[in-house]
Structures are given as structure tokens and as C-alpha cells.
Image: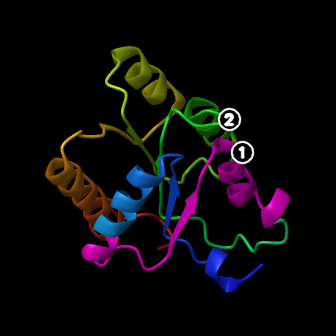
Amino acid sequence: MSDATDKVEVLLVEDTPEDAELTMRTLRKHGLANNLMWVKDGAEALDFLFGTGVYAGRRMASPPRVILLDLHLPKLNGLDVLRRLKADPLTRQIPVVVLTSSTEESDMRVCYELGVNSFVSKPVEFDAFMKVVGKLGFYWLLVNKQPGL
């Protein structure tokens, strides 16, 4: 595996190409996407985080600083990914921000019960979406302090 997958700061787990592109473009615009990795489904996210499947052999010395996780994903949904991440001592402390189109109270409640660090409903309007993603990136990559970083 290349060094590019070893030094990821943001892991974007998003199956909608338009939302992924807008998120990446916004983070780049704010200088927050130097080490961004985009995966398109829940199974690929777990493979990346645990160094399995196509990511077997990836050095995992430094986990992502933050995971932006959609809930509605193919193969393995975001709740299952979150459940697995927060149950494992190797990934439990990685901040996870659910960035989803859901505005359901039940989704929010379950995410917090599973240990999510933040739940954000994606704004539908383009400019509002960009502002939200920019603020998320700024907070989790520049303001928030994590042990060992």
C-alpha cells in the first residue's frame, strides 16, 4: 500500500458522487483536504480502517483525524460501520461525524447511543452545504485537540 493511504486526516465515507465531490471541493477550498480519502460504501470503509481487503498491508500507525460518515450506504450502512468502529479499541477514539441527509430523531438518537461525536444533517442548499462542511473541517482538523496529535 502506498504512503498516501497511510497518512489520511479525513476519511469520507459517502456513496453519492455529487455529495462527495462537493465535500472534497469545500475542504480543499479551506486548505483542509491535503490528506483526504474517499470510500464509497461501508464495507470499503471498514477495509480501509482495519487494513483488510484491498487495503490489506496498509500501515495503520496513524488513524484518520476524523471520519465523515453517511448513514445510507451500500453493502454496509453507516450505523453498522459506526457500531463496529466504536466497539473496537483500535478505532473507538477516532472522531466520527455523521454527515447525512437524514433529519430523523431516531437516527440521531441511535448514532449518539453508538458513540458518534457529531450528527449533522446535510443542508440541501449548495451554499449552506459548503458552509457546514467548511465549519466541520475547520473544527475537527484545526480546533479540536486529540491525544497523540
Drawn side of residue 30 relative to residue 47, left or right: left
- At mark 2, the secondary structure is loop
Q: Can residue 52 be seen here?
A: no
Of residues 4 and 90, which is closer to you in this image? 4
Give the number of the disc on residue 43. Answer: 1
Where residue 22 appears, x then y in whole percent?
34, 59
Drawn side of residue 69 relative to residue 51, left or right: left
The quadrant the N terminus occupies is: bottom right
Where residue 61 appears, x then y in whole percent?
68, 73
Of residues 3 and 141, which is closer to you in this image? 3
Up the image or down, 136 lies above or below 56; here it is above
Up the image or down, 53 lies above or below 98; here it is below
Drawn side of residue 146 relative to residue 88, left or right: left
Q: Are marks 2 and 1 in contact (CB under 8 Å)?
A: yes
Q: Residue at x 40, y 61 (%)?
A: 21
- At mark 1, the secondary structure is helix
Up the image or down, 102 lies above or below 42; here it is above
Q: Which residue is mark 2?
A: 76
Q: State how far apart marks 2 and 1 are (Cα).
A: 6 Å
Where residue 138 appears, x then y in whole percent?
26, 65
Residue pushed farthest front? 18
Drawn side of residue 69 relative to residue 138, left or right: right
Up the image or down, 127 lies above or below 115; here it is below
Q: Residue at x 60, y 51 (%)?
A: 40
> Dot 2: within a 10 Å radius of its alpha carbon, few (fewer than 14), some, or many (20 or more) residues?
some
Q: What span is colored magenta in the figure?
A: 27-55
How many marks can you see? 2
Residue 41: in magenta span = yes
Q: Amino acid at mark 1?
A: Ala
Q: Earlier in the sequence, mark 2 or mark 1?
A: 1
